[in-house]
Image (tube, grey):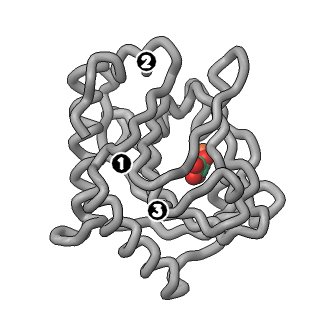
């Protein structure tokens, strides 16, 4: 996941950039297989809305099942973790984002019209999530499956297919987005990067 000047520039001007074929098909398929296997074990839990004591589940808002990952050296998901780490370092160096630690979440939307309504991942002023990087692991995605990521960069909208090996990176405080209803199982791995000032 080498960073190009145009990616850094797009992040500054539009608040996001998109890469297809980001790790290569072989790695992408291995990531898909591992993510799929984790989802199949039943280890994932319904995602909550809001955090802490206010946490609730509401599938009309958000219908995915999630698991927080830990680094797993030697596996395909471990290599993805390393790629996320390298991306954070490159963006800190190239875009002066001052990123520190990150969390990685595996999310599985089971299909059946599950979605995640329009939202932002962080709100300005709260020193929490600075950058969101989403990596899609869906080898046979077709338009009829839905589940596109819809971005609201300002004027108009843009839809991103959650297809194998596609990476979307955006400023968590800035870009509103939503997951359109998905009619086939949909896998995504998301890294959220925090500012360096946050422990
Ligand atoms: O999976 C996606 O495309 C986006 C999910 C999302 O917006 C989130 O988990 O905050
Ligand atoms: Fe989000």
Label 2's element? helix
Furthest toward the right, the residue is 60
Give the residue number, with chain letter if any, for mark 2.
Answer: 10
Image quadrant containing the N terminus: top left
Mark 1 burial class by Cα count in 10 Å: few <14, some 14-19, many 20+? some
- Residue 19 is drawn in which quadrant? top left
The mark nearer the N terminus, 1 or 3, is 1
Mark 3 burial class by Cα count in 10 Å: few <14, some 14-19, many 20+? some
Residue 166: x and y, percent? 43, 46
The mark nearer the N terminus, 3 or 2, is 2
Above or below, 76 relative to 155: below
Q: For ligand 1, tell me if the residue under mark 3 lies within 8 Å.
A: no
Residue 143: x and y, percent? 66, 51
- The residue located at (27%, 51%) in the rendering is 24
Give the residue number, with chain letter if any, for mark 3.
Answer: 139
Q: CA distance from mark 3 to mark 2?
A: 27 Å
Furthest toward the bottom, the residue is 41
From the viewer's side, name the closer residue of 122 and 142: 142
Image quadrant containing the C terminus: top left
- Lateral position of residue 93 relative to residue 100, left or right: left
Residue 49 in view (yes/no)? no
Q: CA distance from mark 1 to mark 3?
A: 26 Å
Residue 142: x and y, percent? 61, 55
Give the residue number, with chain letter if any, for mark 1.
Answer: 102
- Residue 79 is drawn in which quadrant? bottom left
- Lateral position of residue 190 relative to residue 42, left or right: left
Which of discs 3 and 2 lies nearer the camera? The answer is: 3
Residue 134 in view (yes/no)? yes
Contact, CB < 8 Å: mark 1 with mark 3?
A: no
Contact, CB < 8 Å: mark 3 with mark 2?
A: no
- The residue located at (22%, 71%) in the rendering is 75
């Amino acid at each position: 996941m080498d960073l190009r000047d145009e990616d850094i520039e797009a992040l500054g001007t539009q608040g996001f950039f998109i890469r297809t074929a980001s790790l290569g098909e072989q790695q992408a398929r291995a990531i898909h297989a591992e993510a799929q296997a984790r989802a199949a074990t039943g280890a994932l839990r319904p995602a909550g809305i809001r955090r802490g004591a206010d946490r609730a589940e509401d599938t009309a808002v958000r219908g995915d099942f999630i698991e927080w990952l830990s680094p797993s050296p030697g596996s395909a998901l471990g290599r993805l973790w390393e790629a996320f780490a390298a991306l954070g370092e490159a963006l800190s160096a190239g875009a002066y984002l001052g990123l520190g630690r990150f969390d990685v979440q595996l999310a599985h939307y089971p299909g059946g019209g599950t979605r995640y309504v329009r939202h932002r991942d962080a709100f300005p002023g709260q020193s929490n999530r600075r950058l969101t990087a989403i990596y899609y692991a869906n080898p046979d995605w077709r338009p009829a499956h839905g589940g596109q990521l819809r971005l609201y960069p300002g004027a108009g909208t843009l839809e991103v297919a959650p297809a194998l090996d596609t990476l979307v990176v955006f400023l968590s405080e800035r870009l509103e987005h939503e997951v359109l209803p998905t009619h086939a199982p949909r896998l995504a791995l998301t890294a959220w990067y925090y500012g360096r000032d946050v422990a």
